[in-house]
């Protein structure tokens, strides 16, 4: 049952994001590491994706994050590219790189790394909209299989994106209504 619920959540989120982007003529791009391009695949597989999805980049290390997303190596290296502030910079950086209104980012761990004493699995997700971070959180999972963990992180971020864009759209409509009424 949980699997079908996740699929339903994913489909609803993707449809909501698509409708928002098409109706507002917004483009969306993705910067990811932990999910290995899966987030790009999910958005790119959406019907009419070419009308709103601009593309993405997978950057596994700080040199690539520096080269492609302009994240200073001195900020990225101490945390090995896994921090909330790095996710925020990735979301803003991908908007700049792809000239889009919306940027999504995910960085984290989908499997333990014993040699680094990393056993707690999590990801940091961020969403930028019109140059501002509208979502920035640590995402946790109860999944155990690395592939399921990646899917779970993607679904969590896409649902957050859908919810954040709906809230953003409501705020814009309320401001327009207040202006119209005044």
Image: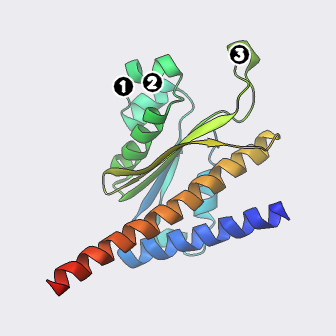
Label 1: state its secondary structure: loop
- The residue that label 1 is drawn on is 72
How many numbered callouts? 3
Q: Is residue 32 visible?
A: no
Structural crowding at the residue carrying mark 1, measured as other residues with C-alpha within 10 Å and reported as few (<14), some (14–19) or many (≥20):
some
**Mark in front: 2 vs 3:** 3
- The residue that label 3 is drawn on is 117
Whole-percent x and y of residue 144?
82, 40
Residue positioned 59% across, 67% down in the render:
13
Task: Out of 53 and 172, give the one closest to the viewer.
Answer: 172
Residue positioned 46% across, 61% down in the render:
164
Structural crowding at the residue carrying mark 3, measured as other residues with C-alpha within 10 Å and reported as few (<14), some (14–19) or many (≥20):
few
Residue positioned 42% across, 41% down in the render:
88
The image quarter in which residue 112 lies? top right
Q: Residue furthest top?
A: 115
In the shown orientation, is residue 147 left or right of residue 107?
A: right
* Circle number at residue 76: 2
Quadrant where the N terminus sits is bottom right
Q: Earlier in the sequence, mark 2 or mark 3?
A: 2
Q: CA distance from mark 2 to mark 1?
A: 6 Å
Q: Residue furthest right?
A: 1
Whole-percent x and y of residue 155?
65, 56
């Amino acid at each position: 049952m949980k699997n079908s619920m996740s699929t339903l959540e994913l489909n609803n989120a993707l449809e909501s994001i698509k409708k928002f982007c098409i109706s507002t003529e917004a483009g969306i791009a993705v910067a990811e590491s932990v999910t290995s391009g899966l987030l790009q695949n999910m958005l790119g597989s959406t019907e009419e994706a070419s009308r709103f999805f601009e593309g993405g980049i997978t950057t596994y290390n700080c040199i690539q994050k520096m080269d492609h997303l302009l994240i200073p190596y001195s900020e990225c290296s101490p945390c090995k590219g896994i921090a909330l502030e790095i996710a925020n910079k990735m979301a803003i950086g991908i908007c700049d790189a792809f000239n889009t209104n919306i940027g999504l980012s995910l960085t984290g761990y989908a499997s333990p790394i014993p040699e680094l004493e990393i056993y707690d699995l999590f990801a940091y997700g961020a969403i930028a909209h019109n140059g501002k971070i509208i979502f920035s959180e640590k995402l946790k999972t109860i999944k155990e299989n690395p592939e399921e963990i990646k899917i779970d992180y993607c679904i969590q971020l896409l649902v957050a994106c859908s919810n954040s864009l709906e809230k953003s759209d409501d705020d814009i409509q309320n401001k327009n209504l207040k202006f119209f009424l005044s």
